Image (cartoon, rainbow, N blue to C red):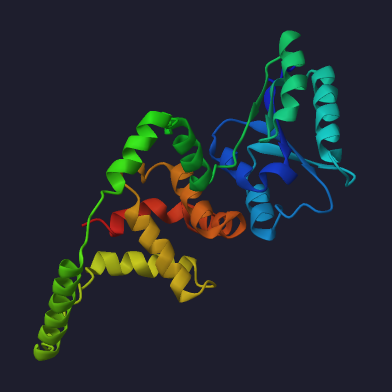
C-alpha cells in the first residue's frame, strides 16, 4: 500500500483580499488551493490564470458561490468544515481580512485541528499613520477658569493713547510711505544655472534598462520608467526578497497591474540587478 503525505489546504476569500493572495505562491511547499469566487469577482485575470496553470506544485479548486450579502463567507465556512471532515489535509488556512471567520476557526482549533486565518492585503500608509497618530496623541489638559482669566489679561494689555501720540503716529506713517515711494525697486539679478551634464549610463546599466523594456514592451514608456525607478530604490538587502518587491509594485500600480508587472519581470530580477550593479 502506498502512503501519500497530507498537504496544507488554503481557502481564499477572493471578494475580500482580491488578488493579493498571489504572494502565497512564492512558497516552495506543496499545497492545495480552494478559491471561493462569485460572478462579481475581478481578481482572476488572464495573467493570474496563466501563472497558476504554469505551476505544478499545487492543485487548484474553484468554488463558485451564489452572489449575495455574506454569501461567500457562508460558503467558505461550510467548505472548511467539509474539508476537515474528509481529513485529507495537514492544516487549513483561511485567507481574508474579515474577522468574522475567527469564531469558526477558534471552534475547530478547540477540537484539535490546525486552523488559522491570515490577511495578505497590506494596509494603506494613511490608515497606519492615522492609527499611530491616535495612539501617540495625548489629551490636552484644559486650563482652569482662573488661568484662562490671567491669559486673557496678559493677551490684552491696557494702552492709554492721548491726542498727541495719535498725531505722532500719523506723521510716522506718512514718513514711511514717502520713503517707500523714493526707493526704486531693485531688479533681481537672475543667473542662469549651468546645465548639469546628463549621467551617461554604463553599458551594463543600458543592458538592464533594455531588459526591463523588452519584458514590459506592451506597457507605456512612462510606466516602464516608473518600474525601473522603483526597482533601483529597493534597498540592496531587500532585492532578493521577492515578496517585498511584489508588495511594492502592488502599492504603486494597484493590485491587478502590479501583479501583472511582477509576473512578467520576477524571473529576471536577479539578472537586472546584476547588470545594473555599479
- Specify the quadrant of the image occupied by residue 209: bottom left
Residue located at (73% from left, 39% from top):
13
Name the foreground residue: 136 vs 102. Answer: 136
Say which residue appears at 65% left-offset and 53% top-offset: 48
Quadrant, the C terminus: bottom left
Q: Quadrant of residue 200?
A: bottom left
Q: Is residue 112 visible?
A: no
Residue 193 falls left or right of residue 111? left
Q: Quadrant of the N terminus?
A: top right
Q: Position of residue 105 (x, y in %)?
A: 73, 20
Q: Relative to 134, does residue 223 appear above or below in the rendering?
A: below
Tell me: 124 left or right of 109. left
Q: Relative to 154, is 250 on the left or the right?
A: right
273 or 259, nearer to the observer: 259
Relative image position of residue 234 (x, y in whole percent): 35, 50
The relative height of residue 170 versus residue 88 in the rendered view (above or below) is: below
Give percent across and percent down for residue 154: 28, 42
Tell me: residue 13, above or below residue 224: above
Q: Percent from the top left, x then y, of residue 162?
A: 20, 64
Q: Tell me: 194 left or right of 148.
A: left
Q: Is residue 76 visible?
A: yes
Q: Residue at x 77, y 21 (%)?
A: 104
Please report the residue visible at 73 percent of the width from the left and 9 percent of the height from the top: 110
Amino acid at each position: 500500500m502506498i502512503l501519500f503525505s497530507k498537504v496544507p489546504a488554503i481557502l481564499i476569500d477572493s471578494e475580500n483580499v482580491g488578488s493579493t493572495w498571489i504572494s502565497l505562491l512564492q512558497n516552495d511547499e506543496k499545497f492545495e488551493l480552494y478559491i471561493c469566487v462569485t460572478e462579481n469577482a475581478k481578481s482572476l485575470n488572464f495573467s493570474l490564470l496563466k501563472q497558476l496553470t504554469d505551476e505544478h506544485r499545487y492543485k487548484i479548486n474553484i468554488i463558485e458561490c451564489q452572489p449575495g450579502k455574506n454569501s461567500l463567507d457562508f460558503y467558505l465556512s461550510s467548505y472548511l468544515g467539509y474539508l476537515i471532515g474528509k481529513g485529507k489535509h495537514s492544516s487549513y488556512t483561511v485567507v481574508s481580512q474579515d474577522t468574522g471567520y475567527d469564531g469558526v476557526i477558534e471552534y475547530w482549533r478547540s477540537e484539535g485541528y490546525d486552523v488559522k486565518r491570515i490577511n495578505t492585503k497590506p494596509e494603506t500608509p494613511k490608515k497606519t499613520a492615522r492609527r499611530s497618530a491616535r495612539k501617540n496623541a495625548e489629551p490636552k489638559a484644559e486650563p482652569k477658569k482662573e488661568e484662562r482669566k490671567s491669559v486673557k489679561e496678559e493677551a490684552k494689555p491696557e494702552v492709554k493713547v492721548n491726542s498727541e501720540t495719535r498725531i505722532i503716529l500719523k506723521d510716522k506713517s506718512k514718513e514711511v510711505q514717502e520713503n517707500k515711494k523714493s526707493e526704486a525697486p531693485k531688479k533681481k539679478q537672475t543667473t542662469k544655472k549651468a546645465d548639469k551634464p546628463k549621467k551617461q549610463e554604463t553599458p551594463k546599466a543600458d543592458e538592464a534598462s533594455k531588459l526591463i523594456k523588452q519584458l514590459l514592451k506592451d506597457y507605456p514608456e512612462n510606466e516602464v520608467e516608473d518600474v525601473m525607478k522603483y526597482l533601483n530604490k529597493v534597498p540592496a538587502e531587500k532585492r532578493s526578497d521577492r515578496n517585498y518587491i511584489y508588495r511594492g509594485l502592488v502599492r504603486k500600480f494597484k493590485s491587478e497591474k502590479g501583479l501583472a508587472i511582477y509576473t512578467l519581470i520576477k524571473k529576471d530580477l536577479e539578472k537586472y540587478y546584476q547588470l545594473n550593479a555599479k
